[in-house]
Amino acid sequence: MRTEGTEQSRDGLGSETGEDSGVGGAAAHGEGGLRGEAGRVRPAPGSPRVRIDAWSAGDLGLLRAANAAELMTHLGGPETEEQILKRHERYVALSADRTDKGRMFRVVLLPEEIPVGTIGFWEQTWDGEQVYETGWTVLAAHQGRGIAAAAVAAVVERARAERTHRSLHAFPSVDNPASNALCRRAGFSLLGERDFEYPPGHPRRVNNWRLRLT
């Protein structure tokens, strides 16, 4: 599954937010985790282990795999090869940036060491406030195992460690029940619905989920 982001994230950095959809190696357990203090998620017994690694030049194949039609339903369909290449360049640049603008990661399933998705967080201006936004994708063959929840738990800790912005937002479509359920499990609070049109000609209604980082 995949989570969709806002117009800025699709144009700029983000991936869609979906069901199952550090830099260099934060590991986490996921799905069905219990919410702990300060928005943290405690891993549930038997949940999968994942590691999130900084996006690199070698991850283009993973980005192409994440462009599958079934994963782009909430984002107006698959991107062109040119769009994929530009997005890959942006992901690599963001992961190399050291000005707290965010990070993009590949999601690696452990102990198999298999790349199974993408996740990240990036700066966004929301209602006049600088915040982080997150979005993720888990390849179809690996969905339904709690991988997305594990990756979200890991990326929340990465965003929190930046000590830059007070909150992390996610914007799944209102008709994406898996993504919305995952936001709730991960400790995000639902602030309401908003309207977006992205890509042009594709209006959609999203839920605004917020998790406090500080």
Image (cartoon, rainbow, N blue to C red):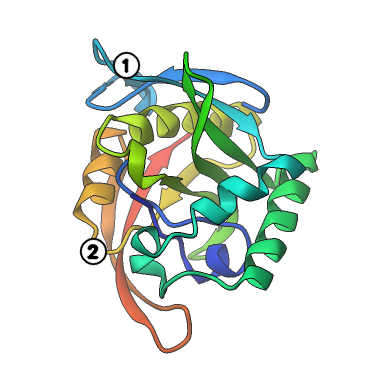
User: Which amino acid does the dot numbered 2 rest on?
Assistant: Val
Give amino acid for label 1. Arg
Is the residue marked by circle 2 packed among few (<14), some (14-19), or many (20+) residues within 10 Å? some
Quarter occupied by residue 145: top left
Label 2 secondary element: loop
- As measured in the structure, the alpha-carbon distance from the residue carrying label 2 to the one carrying label 1 is 26 Å
Task: State whether residue 107 appears in this view.
Answer: yes
Q: Residue at x 49, y 53 (%)?
A: 66
| Looking at the image, residue 151 lies above or below residue 75 | above
Q: Nearer the viewer, residue 117 or 168?
A: 117
> Residue at horizontal 68%, vertical 50%?
91
Q: Which quadrant of the structure image shows residue 79?
A: bottom right
Q: How many marks?
A: 2
Where's residue 206, x and y in %? 31, 66
From the viewer's side, name the closer residue of 152 and 85. 85
Residue 214 in view in this figure = no
At 49% from the left and 59% from the top, the residue drawn is: 67
Q: Which residue is mark 1?
A: 42
Mark before the other along the chain sequence, 2 or 1: 1
How far across and how far down the image is residue 122, in percent? 60, 50
Q: Secondary structure at mark 1?
A: strand
Please provide percent x and percent y for residue 135. Answer: 46, 50
Position of residue 1 in the picture relative to residue 162 (left or right): left
Q: Considering depth in this image, is 127 or 29 the residue closer to the camera? A: 29
Is residue 150 placed above or below 110 in the rendered structure? below
Q: Is residue 97 left or right of residue 16?
A: right
Few, some or many residues within 10 Å of mark 1 (<14, 14–19, 20+): some
**Rendered position, 57 above or below 35:** below
Residue at image position (29%, 55%) is 191
Give the percent coordinates (x, y) of residue 170. 40, 51
Mark 2 highlights which residue?
174
